[in-house]
Image: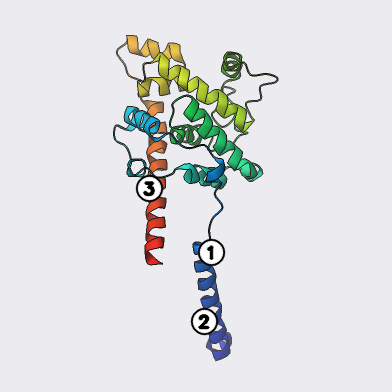
Amino acid sequence: METILNPNWNKLAVFTFAVGALASRMVAQAPVYVPSFELPQLQVEIQKVQVKELLQRAPSSLIEGSDGRGFIYKTLAKRLPLAYQAQAGEIAHTLITEANKYNLDPIFLLAVIQTESRYNPKARGRHGDLGLMQLLPNTGLWMAKRLKLQGHVDLRDPVTNIKIGAAYFAFLRKHFGAKGSRYLAAYNMGIRNVHRLLKEDKEPILYASRVLKNYRSLYSEWSSSLLLQHNTVASN
């Protein structure tokens, strides 16, 4: 009680609060290191094609032509396990490069990673699937041969995992004629099982809905971050 009523302590509390607020403002205004200049350009028109396949309508952040490289990098830097955060730039570079190579949206690949492993390169599924995109070893070896990758294929390596996972999605997308729910389901349950359901006049939607929820969520986060940046600039 004596401490609370001591006027000197009250002055100290006010001073401490003021310093903290000033420091917070300085941190908020300080430039955040985002290695966009080191990352490949996003191919926005290609992104829009896959967004239309999966979400029907392009999010505002994509319509405005905003640069999503910083968002991809910061998402990885924030959500990767601590031991891998130093690799966020390299992983972001691989994600965008492979997305561009196969005409995929890198935000879509990010949504798959979020769904499959929650950004944990060491994740292991109950069927033996490994890494960021949770690839089965047999699938990984098959795709590695198609891609002519040399040496040991370690699916727990984030870069290798993304290279193989993106190529496999491109293969499935072509196989199913860019029908989003089908190539998504095939990634999860296999091509044969999807064809079996289709013969029974059933569309596989369960896994697709999980990925699409994260896909929409990531675009929403990106849009919110852009709005926050805009408001911060306007207030200054």
Q: Which residue is the site of mark 3?
A: 223
At x 57%, y 83%, the residue is 12
Residue 108: x, y in percent?
A: 43, 33
Mark 3 or mark 2, earlier in chain? 2
Label 2 amino acid? Val
Residue 147: numbered disc? none
User: CB under 8 Å between callouts 1 and 3?
Assistant: no
Q: Is residue 172 above or below residue 113?
A: above
What residue would you read off at disc 1?
27
Q: Within the image, what quadrant is residue 215 found in?
A: top left
Q: 172 left or right of 179?
A: right
141 over 7 or under it: above or below: above
Amino acid at the residue labelled 3: Ser
The answer to whether mark 3 and mark 2 are in CB contact below 8 A is no
Secondary structure, mark 1, is: helix
- Say which label, 1 or 3, has the lower sequence index: 1
Mark 1 vs mark 3, CA separation in Å: 22 Å
